[in-house]
Image (cartoon, rainbow, N blue to C red):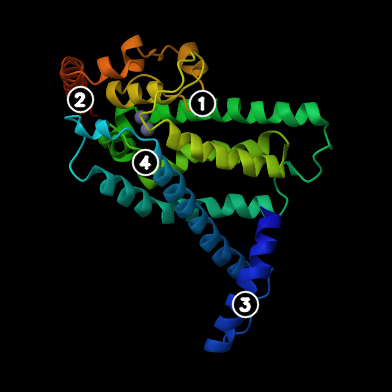
Amino acid sequence: MDVVMQYADEYLFDSVYMGISSYTGIPYLERQNPVRVIGSLFVFIMSYIVVFYLGTAGFEYVYIYDKDNMKHPKFLKNQVQMEITTSLKAFPTITVLTIPWIYAEINGYTLLYDDPFKYGIAYLALSAVMFLLFTDFCIYWIHRLLHHPLVYTRFHKLHHKWVVCTPFASHAFDPIDGYLQSLPYHLATLVFPIYKYLYLALFAFVNVWSVMIHDGNYLSNNPIINGAAHHTLHHTRFQYNYGQFTTIFDRLFNSHMRPGPSVYNSSIRKSQANISKETNEIDKMLKVVDATKF
Ligand SMILES: [Zn+2]
Ligand SMILES: [Zn+2]
């Protein structure tokens, strides 16, 4: 991120702050000035999230998403607009809460490293696997705790407004919920060394993955991968499949539900009989979830 911010300073922020200074008479803020760093990070992180979210979710929505899902009785009126609005409203708060983490990364307070050969190629590959398993484990527990009746309604219920999702549901959270579920990606940089460009690539990957598990495109029938079929079950059955990338922790902690074979057969899945059965089950589940409050 330090290199990215150097480029951003060189090609954008230097001239922006110069312009602000000459227009307002406020002294020019040098690159190391904390006010400038925080301001630049806000603009940079916010732009990154908005462009990445609208770009990947928009691409998936146009080219991959099965629009038949929108005929489901549980698909809400104006849902796509609501998902996008919810996401865009959450981004400023998530950005503010993320600034200290990126600030720490830029200033060398994390274990991110510059030389890809520092710990060898084998470690480079291993660190990517460790990153996915570590964050999967943490997100599993954060997500599972967010389903606790004490906090579910306040923080996580908003994401479950989308029972039949579109790719735009991927980032449509309450801001605190979204931030908490992103925390493991930053925590990982304090727990074990990661090559900084690999970290940037992994960060992009996890965002794309979030979009993919909400796109209703059931590509993977692999029992270990937590694909769209597994995450769809999370949105329709609520108390299963809390994991992000794998089913490992759902299996270990007894919350795994494997999608039935009919899920992968689109003519059965889209049949009126199947949709009616599913709608009944969702309604039963919703009654239980909504009634469980402290
Ligand atoms: Zn959930
Ligand atoms: Zn979801």
Left or right of 97 in this view: 163: left
Q: CA distance from mark 1 to mark 2?
A: 25 Å
Residue 235: x %, y % from top left: 31, 27
Toward the viewer: 290 or 213? 213
Q: CA distance from mark 3 to mark 4?
A: 36 Å
**Disc 3 beta carbon < 8 A from ligand 2?**
no
Mark 1 / mark 2, whichever is N-terminal: 1
Badge 4 marks a residue whose secondary structure is: helix
Toward the viewer: 106 or 86? 86
- Quarter placement of the C terminus: top left
Do the numbered discs 1 and 2 sit on residues whose CB atoms are within 8 Å? no
**Disc 1 beta carbon < 8 A from ligand 2?**
no
Mark 1 / mark 4, whichever is N-terminal: 4
Badge 1 marks a residue whose secondary structure is: loop
Do the numbered discs 1 and 4 sit on residues whose CB atoms are within 8 Å? no
> Where residue 258 is drawn, which disc sits there?
none
Residue 132: x %, y % from top left: 59, 28
> Where residue 286 is drawn, which disc sits there?
2
Residue 134: x %, y % from top left: 59, 27
Q: CA distance from mark 1 to mark 3?
A: 41 Å
Q: Closer to us: mark 2 or mark 4?
A: 4
Badge 2 marks a residue whose secondary structure is: helix
Name the residue type under label 1.
Answer: Phe
> Where residue 61 is drawn, which disc sits there?
4
Left or right of 58 in this view: 276: left
Question: Picture quarter containing residue 168?
Answer: top left
Q: CA distance from mark 1 to mark 4?
A: 21 Å
Q: Which residue is mark 1?
A: 245
Q: Which residue is mark 3?
A: 15
Q: CA distance from mark 2 to mark 4?
A: 27 Å
- Judge whether residue 33 can be spotted in this image: no
Residue 199: x %, y % from top left: 65, 41
